[in-house]
Amino acid sequence: MTYCVGLRLNSGLLFMSDTRTNAGLDNVSTFRKMHEWSAPGKAAITVMTAGNLATTQAVISLLDERSKAPSERAPSILEQPSMYQVARLVGDTLREVIAGHAETGQRADAAFNATMIVGGQIGEGEPRLFLVYPEGNFIEASEDTPFFQIGETKYGRPILVRAFDPDMGFEDAIKLLLVSFDSTIKANLSVGLPLDFQIYEAGSLTSAPIRRVERDDAYFQTISDGWGDALKLAFDSLPAFTLPDA
């Protein structure tokens, strides 16, 4: 299982993903699910993946290979004129990989399912964020839907719905996502540390480094312990329920 979140902030974009993959309780591995392409001054693109690992790795490998020699291996993700076209290319590549696997006799909609979050900025266009489905179609984040989740989404969603504000700075947004991931990790063993995150500042047209929150990260432990204590205090402060008279 996987948990990835992309936030659309007024100051830019924020991406965070876990790194755990598993094929049963005794086969747990760590794989990066966040990938980026950058042409400084021209384009900055980030893709996060969830679903069948073979499918997602094949899609990323194709996108990466075609970006290294675009004149020979078109289409290149860095040669797209807009983020809409980037999302379309990612969707087409995902559909291409799933269809290729289906031809071997497996059912693509079950065995090779994958979804992706695509975000970034091209030239003078605005930073944009998309959710790409296995069928290759996609939707875009907006003021009404300012964030996307993929993978194990249900446990970390309530804090995002209640606390997200597009005006918040990157520091508060990272703190919010760490609470969301902590809630998910505690509820589902198939999501786990380390976590990767990346900030994209609107207009910078260059990818910031992908940073990692390790298992022994002191700040994450402070957030985890503090959020648990705060929830208990909030619960204790609520008025008690009064049973009706028999």
Image (cartoon, rainbow, N blue to C red):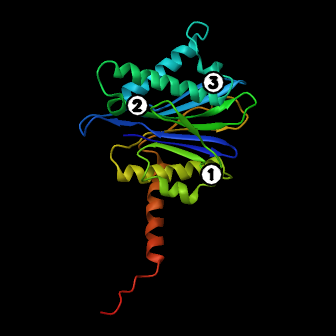
Q: How far is the residue under mark 1 from the one under mark 3? A: 28 Å
Q: Residue furthest top?
A: 72
The reply to whether residue 122 is visible in this rendering is: yes
Q: Is residue 199 visible?
A: no
* C-alpha gap between disc 2 and disc 1: 32 Å
Q: Which quadrant of the structure image shows residue 76?
A: top right
- In the drawing, does residue 210 fall left or right of residue 239? right
In the image, is 11 to the left or to the right of 172?
A: right
Residue 216 in the image: x percent, y percent?
42, 44
The residue carrying mark 1 is 144
Against 3, is 233 above or below? below
Question: Residue 118: percent from the left, percent from the top?
Answer: 56, 33
What quarter of the picture does the N terminus occupy? top left
Please say if the residues under marks 3 and 2 sit with CB atoms less than 8 Å apart. Answer: no
Would you place residue 108 above or below residue 164 in this image?
above
Instruction: Mark 1 and mark 3 in contact? Answer it, CB < 8 Å.
Output: no
Amino acid type indicated by mark 3: Ser
Q: Which residue is mark 3?
A: 38
| Dot 1 or dot 3, earlier in sequence | 3
Quadrant in which the C terminus is drawn? bottom left
Q: Amino acid at mark 2?
A: Phe
The residue that mark 2 highlights is 31
Callout 1: SS: loop
How many residues crowd mark 1 within 10 Å: few (<14), some (14–19), many (20+)? Answer: few
**Label 3 or label 2, whichever comes before in sequence order:** 2
| Amino acid at the residue labelled 1 | Asp
Question: Is 94 placed above or below 155 here?
Answer: above
